[in-house]
Amino acid sequence: MTTPSVLAIVLAGGEGKRLMPLTADRAKPAVPFGGIYRLIDFVLSNLANGHYLKIVVLTQYKNHSLDRHISRTWRLSAMLGNYVTPVPAQQRLGPRWFAGSADALFQNLNLIYDEMPEHAIVFGADHIYRMDPRQMVQQHVDSGTDVTVAAIRQPLSLADQFGVIETDPAGRKIVAFREKPKDAVGLPDAPDQVYASMGNYVFRTQALIDAVREDALDPVSKHDLGGNIIPMMVKSGGAEVYDFANNVVPGSTDRDRGYWRDVGTLDAYYEAHMDLISAHPVFNLYNARWPIHTGHDPLPPAKFVHNDGDRVGRAVDSLVSPGVIISGGMACRSILSPRVMMHSHSQVEDSVLMDSVRVGRGAMIRRAIIDKNVVIPDGARIGFDLEADRSRYAVTRGGVVVIGKNEIIDR
């Protein structure tokens, strides 16, 4: 059987306003996650593990660190014709930014013309999940449809939080695609559930080209894939759903199969981190058969020093990255990124510390996200008095204190 030719396009141009201050100085897909990764590593790993090795990444806002990460980390064999290429907004059609995800594709049709694949994968860049895209592509090819939309099952009661896909009685053909409906209808095989769009699509290439060209001529369109292109294809009868529950990733277990998180808010970003640290995590970073790839600086192993009375360097229920030194401090249920330094008698609980954070002697941190290069002074307390914290830092609805990159902290 001939393998269909496929080009993968990753949409990585979003501002990520709801992740401020983490996106004050970087694109959303470049935000660190899980100690050593960036958000974009998850979609790129899924594509690479699935052997889709011609990948373009469309970037736009604050793209320097994202472009640098891709260029340094995601190097594939040019001799074999493989590549992961960041493509900043080129303004090929005039001095304007992308007006939406469909416009981003329209402005970069030259990338599709250069390859002219039979099918185009178009995935988002800022979700945490494992997925074997080959299974979705195979369903798409077998069906002969114009577009296949990946969907995850969600409770009917939460339908007004998602883009909801409604199908025919057979459960595959899409008959409606609605944004956050109040009157959603349950699935044919599960009346208490709906299909929520994951923002991942597989297109027949010519159908995609025709659709974004037509959309570009519509003056009232928002030029959005989910809001405009998919409804257009639904209307023409050329759209099917792919049920993410059917996707089986090598090495997955019943506990972590089907995991998907949209980390579009600070609370969601925090909770996704907390999903990593239990003894049997609901998202397992240790699946060697479907690894999450990333780049590493040449750092030494983590080090835990001092064992003198109550001055003991230790970490429990935590992820500790290379280059970390816990010098007489205690980390519990936390993620420590490379080069974090914890001094004596400091305590970090239920928190995410990014690259090169320094925690002073006797400092205490609870339920916090602290971005890179922040120095926590000796004796400081963060996360214990949220009213006081709100006067200085961002505090989420869920009560998580968030301190931006390079911020100066007073006691």
Image (cartoon, rainbow, N blue to C red):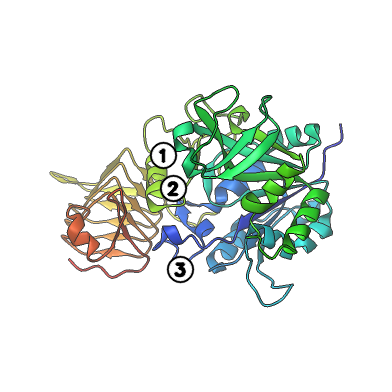
- Looking at this view, name the residue that lies furthest to the right: 2
Which of 338 and 269 lies nearest the eye of the viewer? 269
**Label 3 near label 2: C-beta < 8 Å?**
no
**Label 2 near label 1: C-beta < 8 Å?**
yes
- For badge 3, the amino acid type reads Asp
Alpha-carbon distance for marks 1 and 2? Answer: 8 Å
Of tags 3 and 1, which is closer to the observer? Answer: 3
Label disc, if present, on residue 398 of the rendered structure: none
Q: Which residue is drawn at 32% across and 54% down?
A: 396
Residue 213 position, x and y percent, is 78, 60
Label disc, if present, on residue 276 of the rendered structure: 1
Question: What secondary structure is found at the residue carrying circle 2?
Answer: loop
Question: What secondary structure is found at the residue carrying circle 1?
Answer: loop
Residue 303 position, x and y percent, is 33, 49
Q: How crowded is mark 1: few (under 14 residues within 10 Å), some or many (20 or more)?
A: many
Quick check: 183 left or right of 113? left
- Looking at this view, name the residue that lies furthest to the top: 189
Alpha-carbon distance for marks 2 and 3? Answer: 19 Å
Q: Quadrant of the C terminus?
A: bottom left
- For badge 1, the amino acid type reads Leu
Q: Name the residue under label 2.
A: 34
Q: Which of marks 1 and 2 is nearer the N terminus?
A: 2
Question: What secondary structure is found at the residue carrying circle 3?
Answer: loop
Q: In which quarter of the image is the N terminus?
A: top right
Residue 316 position, x and y percent, is 29, 39
Q: In this view, does 185 lie above or below 353?
A: above
Residue 221 position, x and y percent, is 66, 60
Which of 179 and 202 lies nearest the eye of the viewer? 179
Q: Which residue is drawn at 51% across and 29% down?
A: 193
Quick check: 52 left or right of 348? right
- For badge 2, the amino acid type reads Gly
Q: Name the residue under label 3.
A: 25
